[in-house]
Image: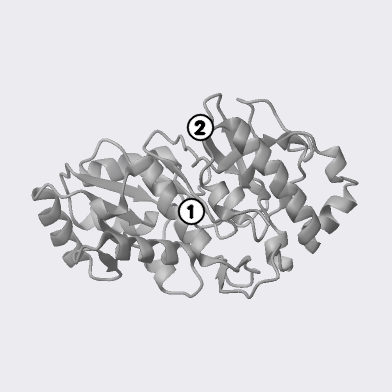
Amino acid sequence: MIDSCTIFNIKNETEFEDLALQVFNFQFNNNKVYRSFCDLLYKHPSDIKTIEDIPFLPIQFFKSHCVLSSNQAIKATFSSSGTTGHTTSKHYVTDLEIYKHSFTKGFHQFYGEIKDYVVLALLPSYLEREGSSLIYMVNEMILQSKNEASGFYLNNISELKDTLTDLDSQGKKVLLIGVSFALLDLVETHQFNLKHTIIMETGGMKGRRKELIRGELHKQLKQGFGVENIHSEYGMTELLSQGYSNGKGLFNCPNWMRILTRDTEDALTILPQGKTGGINVIDLANINSCSFIATQDLGRVYKNGSFEVIGRFDNSDIRGCNLMVF
């Protein structure tokens, strides 16, 4: 068994690749669904020499199968939002401490200690259902902030406006994380000029508004909040790690997560950096489910490891977490 501490202490690319190959071998031998998928492709550990050789499990398997590499008891089941009549993805989690460690250390890598922030959450569509991994993460961040002003907001928009204005005027470091349609609702009723607040959108209009391209969404939010940049989070039910963007649509991954792109016509072919293709995610925090996932997102990876999301495959469900049509 691979120690989760090893995953979160990766220091360089060599360590990442070595551990990714170890995780592949572990999941090949312990994940029945992933093993069957690899067998169908005639892919065996003896064939896998680099991370580009690893088979990536189509994300749809989380809708139809129990994707597990552990025989431990399931501690939580995270589910995607979905729409009426659509099957939702389910991510069965046997170790919630790994998830907590992942989002805590991932946030720290890009933003510093959570306890240094007042964490405000405007996530109505997520609060209105059960099983959201985003709500679990943000709730833990609120608790870790240890600030009595931190909390969730649903319909009390006027109170949120007053809290935001007061905290920012006091020079407090504030993180407002919100779903796109709710952030737009807020700035349509209240105008801000924030100096110490990070606005982080998680994407998705949830059918409440017309979908916008990211550039237009960010333009409206920057004007409404009076900030220079809108930050973004790239996450999904099937992952236990997140990528973050501090503006301009470019995301970066924590040290235990990588993005590759695949040929849209040949799913086994990994594309060179800079080429647009289907986004493949390596999330080593998914040690107990599957760390190698082929998403339905389209994107591009750059030489420094940053990436952008530029759309979705045709006929794929619109997912709520930071996926917008371009």
Is 213 left, or right, of 295 in this rendering? left
From the viewer's perspective, is the residue at label 2 or at label 1 nearer? 1
- The residue sitting at 71% across, 64% down in the picture is 67
Dot label at residue 59 = none
Circle 1 Cα neighbour tier, 10 Å, few/some/many (<14 / 14–19 / ≥20): many
Is 225 left, or right, of 65 in this rendering? left
Going by the numbered disc 1, the residue's amino acid type is Ser
Circle 2 Cα neighbour tier, 10 Å, few/some/many (<14 / 14–19 / ≥20): some
**Can I make out residue 163 in this image?**
yes
Of residues 237 and 49, which is closer to you in this image? 49
Going by the numbered disc 2, the residue's amino acid type is Ser
* Colour pattern of the rendering: one colour
Q: Which residue is mark 1?
A: 102
Task: Residue 9: give x, y in percent of width and height.
Answer: 51, 43
Quadrant where the N terminus sits is: bottom right
Mark 2: secondary structure: loop
- The residue sitting at 68% across, 63% down in the picture is 62
Task: Residue 160: give x, y in percent of width and height.
Answer: 20, 63
Q: Which residue is mark 2?
A: 306
Of residues 250 and 45, which is closer to you in this image? 45
